Structure formats: structure tokens, C-alpha cells
Image (cartoon, grey):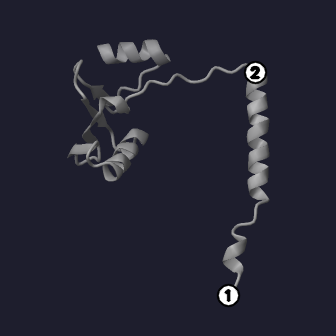
Amino acid sequence: MNDFERVSNEVSGESNYETSCECAIEWLRGDKVATVTFPCSNKYNSRIRKLAAERPDDVKIRHENKDGSIVATIPVKYIKINPPVILSEEQREKKAEQMKAVRERRLHLPVNADAHHDD
């Protein structure tokens, strides 16, 4: 067993070595720009592509591989680590009820009442 499989097994209890794709974020202390690498079928790949179009001065795709994976540079200040919110069972149930109410309200909203008027 190689190191990747060993660490993967320790974290998730199983290995996904054959189906995994490399994701990397790297920068040196003091740098203002980080290099990121994401596979093609990854939400971050899509996000980086969108940011490159919206903010070309900040986000640059440096290389795109044939498989669609990318290497890009982004400002270090864009990197955030956000742990998931820990909710009690009661809080989770309350949030579920709130989301259900929001969905119900959306179902009963008119599509676009103004669009049907002829002037």
C-alpha cells in the first residue's frame, strides 16, 4: 500500500486512489498569489473559470490540460477555510422546516405577472 492509499484509508476508511484527481493549492509565505490545480469535474474548476472571466486581473488560468483540468493563479486573499456548521438535532429539524416553508412559498409565487401584459 502506498502513502496516498494509507492516508486515504485513515481519513475515509476506504481508498479512492484509482478514481481520484489531484487538487492543489500552494503559495509561499509572503506571496500575494497562489497557484491552484483542479480536475475538470470539480466545482472549484468551474468557480475558477467563472472568476477568470469576471476578474481577469486577479484570476488567470495558466494552463489547461486535455482532460479539462486547470492550473491557475489567484490572490492568496481568496483562499478561505470554512468548517461546516455543527447543528444539534433540534437545530437541524428547525432549519429543515424553514427550508420547507421557503420552498412552499416559491411554489406559490407567480412566474412573472408583468410579462403577460400587452401594452
Q: Residues within 10 Å of mark 1 (few under 14, many from 20)?
A: few
Q: How many marks?
A: 2
Compare residues 9 and 109 and report the one nearer the observer: 109
| Chain-order first, disc 2 or disc 1 | 2
Q: Are marks 2 and 1 in contact (CB under 8 Å)?
A: no
Q: Position of residue 114 (x, y in %)?
A: 69, 74
Q: Is residue 77 above or below residue 58?
A: above
What residue do we see at 35% from left, 52% from top?
Answer: 54
Q: Is residue 28 visible?
A: yes
The alpha-carbon separation of the residues under discs 2 and 1 comes to 53 Å
Q: Residue furthest front?
A: 119
Q: Position of residue 96 (x, y in %)?
A: 75, 35
> Position of 38 compared to 106: left or right?
left
> Position of 15 compared to 68: left or right?
right
Q: Position of residue 9 (x, y in %)?
A: 43, 15
Mark nearest the camera among 2 and 1 is 1
Which residue matches tag 2? 89
Amino acid under disc 1 = Asp
Which residue matches tag 1? 119
Compare residues 105 and 70 and report the one nearer the observer: 105
What residue do we see at 73% from left, 19% from top?
Answer: 88
Q: Position of residue 62 (x, y in %)?
A: 20, 43
What residue do we see at 71% from left, 82% from top?
Answer: 117
Amino acid under disc 2 = Glu
Q: Is residue 20 visible?
A: no
> Position of 3 compared to 15: left or right?
left
Q: Residue furthest bottom?
A: 119
Query: What is the secondary structure assignment of the residue under circle 1?
Result: loop
Q: Residues within 10 Å of mark 2 (few under 14, many from 20)?
A: few
Query: What is the secondary structure assignment of the residue under circle 2?
Result: helix
What residue do we see at 67% from left, 87% from top?
Answer: 119
